[in-house]
Structures are given as C-alpha cells and as structure tokens.
Image (cartoon, rainbow, N blue to C red):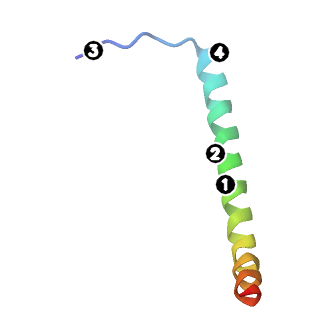
C-alpha cells in the first residue's frame, strides 16, 4: 500500500475552504438552472 505524505493542518483547512466554496458555487448554479429552465422552455415553445 502506498504511504501518503502527511498534509499540514493549515493546508487541510485551506483545501476544506476551497471545497466548500466550490460546492456552494455548484449548488448556486444548479439552483439557478432549475429556476430558469421552465421559463426558457416556455419561451422556446411559444416562439415556435
């Protein structure tokens, strides 16, 4: 089994903050897409 290099606690905290920020951005984008999709579908269906 490979031995992993120990990560300093400061780096662990930074990585955790980056992961939380990335997860929040993905969550916000998904929420926006879910909210906008019905309007876009309605607009496209009336345009045709």
Q: Which residue is mark 1?
A: 27
Q: Give the numbered dot on residue 2.
A: 3
Q: In 3D space, how far apart are the residues under numbered discs 2 and 1 (Cα atoms)?
A: 6 Å
Mark 3 or 1: the one toward you: 1
Q: Earlier in the sequence, mark 4 or mark 1?
A: 4
Q: Earlier in the sequence, mark 2 or mark 3?
A: 3
Q: Give the numbered dot on residue 17.
A: none
Q: Which residue is mark 2?
A: 23
Instruction: Specify whether 22 is left or right of 43.
Output: left
Q: Is residue 29 above or below residue 21?
A: below
Q: Secondary structure at mark 1?
A: helix
Quarter holding the C terminus is: bottom right
Instruction: Specify whether 30 is left or right of 43.
Output: left
Q: In 3D space, how far apart are the residues under numbered discs 2 and 4 (Cα atoms)?
A: 20 Å
Instruction: Specify whether 9 is left or right of 6.
Output: right
Mark 4 or 1: the one toward you: 1
Q: In 3D space, how far apart are the residues under numbered discs 4 and 1 (Cα atoms)?
A: 26 Å
Mark 2 or 4: the one toward you: 2
Residue 34 % position (x, y):
68, 69
Q: Is residue 43 above or below residue 30?
A: below
Residue 27 % position (x, y):
67, 54
Q: Which residue is mark 4?
A: 10
Count neighbours of disc 2 (C-alpha within 10 A) and say few if under 14, some if 14 to 19, many if 20 or more.
Answer: few
Q: Secondary structure at mark 3?
A: loop
Tag 2–tag 1 contact (CB < 8 Å): yes
Q: Please give the count of numbered marks on the rendered protein.
A: 4
Tag 4–tag 1 contact (CB < 8 Å): no
Q: Is residue 33 above or below residue 29?
A: below
Q: Secondary structure at mark 2?
A: helix
Count neighbours of disc 3 (C-alpha within 10 A) and say few if under 14, some if 14 to 19, many if 20 or more.
Answer: few
């Amino acid at each position: 089994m490979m031995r992993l290099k120990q990560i300093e606690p400061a780096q662990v905290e930074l990585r955790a903050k980056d992961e939380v920020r990335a997860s929040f951005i993905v969550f916000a984008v998904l929420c926006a897409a879910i909210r906008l999709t019905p309007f876009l579908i309605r607009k496209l269906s009336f345009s045709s």
